[in-house]
Amino acid sequence: MKKKLALASILLLPFIFLLYMLFVVEVEDPIKYIYTITGATALMLLYITTIISMLKKAINLVKYRRMVGLFSFFYALLHMINFVVLDMELDAASVISETLKRPFIYLGTISFLLLVFMSITSTKKLFPKFYKYHKVIYISIILSSVHFVMAQKALSVEQWVYLSIMPIVLVFKLLQRTKIIHI
Amino acid sequence: MQERIYRFRCVEGWSMVVPWVGFELPQLIKYLKPLSSAKYIRFETLYDPDQFPDQKRGVLAAIEYPYVEALRMDEAMNPLSFIATGLYRHTLPPQNGAPLRLITPWKYGFKSIKSIAKITFTDTEPINTWQKIASNEYGFFANVNPNVDHPRWSQARERVLGKFFKQDTLMFNGYEKEVAHLYKGIDLKKLF
Ligand code: HEM
């Protein structure tokens, strides 16, 4: 329990950092900054969630997996709220038209809906029935990555870093599934 | 030298107001006396990997160098076209494009080429850096236009730096009176 609390506090750090940058440092482009911090954190936590699954035979951290996944959803939710409240200014018509018109937005939305699905079905009661569908986390990772690449004019070095983790995770998972490596 | 306070609108959706210091581009052109056959003015950024970190990355660089931007002669001769040597009453810092930077406030920010090292007059339309990377996304003119979206995102509104709320983007970034005549008869949806 104590360990879980400690983990939750660590997972909240990006959020506290974001608040600090927004209201104390006052970054000059807040909407963009919220996208970057929440989007990158959500994606990183999705990676960590999958890595916990992959390494469970070597180091069993599965009891923390749900919390990491839920925090990823939490950051994705902030990201989505940033879109609806600050970027679209609660204008339902533009939320809908932008979502349907822009491929990078609907890919992000699909990815987000997959996270919603996994969060809802992650309870003790529902997880046994639904865990096999939680493989959609890999689809969510791929869609989110395509999504953030399409949102940019050119990729920065940091963006290349979070992009390059994707093939490593996917190839590792594939090798494990096909029993080429045993971890 | 004079101060010019211009709106600045980035193609990625942010905007700010900047007090530049410098001189009108038409003054420089008159001094350079191009041939009457010149139809375009082409600018090139300094290529010096020792000073520009991204140029050092070779094939891993974000874009191809040297950076190129160009204007039609009549655009360049518009009195709004400006060469900045400073901002906020100080000399331009290196990252803002020292020593000379083009400023065309009715166009998206990427037109305002930094650290100009070479100017050429030509009669054929040059291909600008972003145009070369993605001509379906970045046209030769790159005029600020809230009615023509970037293929991947909307250009109707902008995020003013330092503010939480957005504002409407104005046609030609608010300089319609000064520059609209340059594009009479041109379909700006096609030639964006
Ligand atoms: C409701 C669904 C979503 C919407 C409407 C949305 C919207 C956006 C928008 C508009 C941007 C562009 C910001 C800009 O550069 O101006 C963006 C960037 C980004 N999004 Fe999303 N997104 C969604 C879901 C997601 C999800 C689920 C993830 C990750 C798990 C994600 C990760 C990212 C990342 C990493 C960036 C790049 C940030 C940067 O480098 O600046 N997004 N998103």
Image: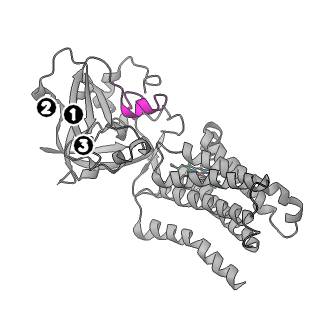
Q: Residue furthest left?
A: B31
> Label 1 lies in what chain?
B
What residue sits right under mark 3 in the picture?
Answer: B115
Circle 2 packing at 10 Å, graded few (<14), some (14-19), many (20+), is some
> Label 3 lies in what chain?
B
In this view, the residue in front, B118 or A151, is B118
Q: Residue furthest bottom?
A: A2
Is label 2 in a helix, a strand or a loop? helix
What residue sits right under mark 1 in the picture?
Answer: B118
In this view, the residue in front, B135 or A105, is B135
Q: Which of the 4 quarters of the picture holds residue A121?
A: bottom right
Q: From the image, which quarter does the C terminus of chain A lie in? A: bottom right
Looking at numbered disc 3 in the image, what kind of residue is underneath it? Ser
Circle 1 packing at 10 Å, graded few (<14), some (14-19), many (20+), is few
Circle 3 packing at 10 Å, graded few (<14), some (14-19), many (20+), is many
Classify residue B39 as left or right of residue A176. left
The majority secondary structure of the magenta stretch comes to loop
Looking at the image, is mark 3 or mark 2 nearer the viewer? 3
Which stretch is magenta?
Answer: B126-144
Q: Are marks 1 and 3 in contact (CB under 8 Å)?
A: no
Q: From the image, which quarter does the N terminus of chain A lie in? A: bottom right
Q: CA distance from mark 3 to mark 2?
A: 19 Å
What residue sits right under mark 2 in the picture?
Answer: B27
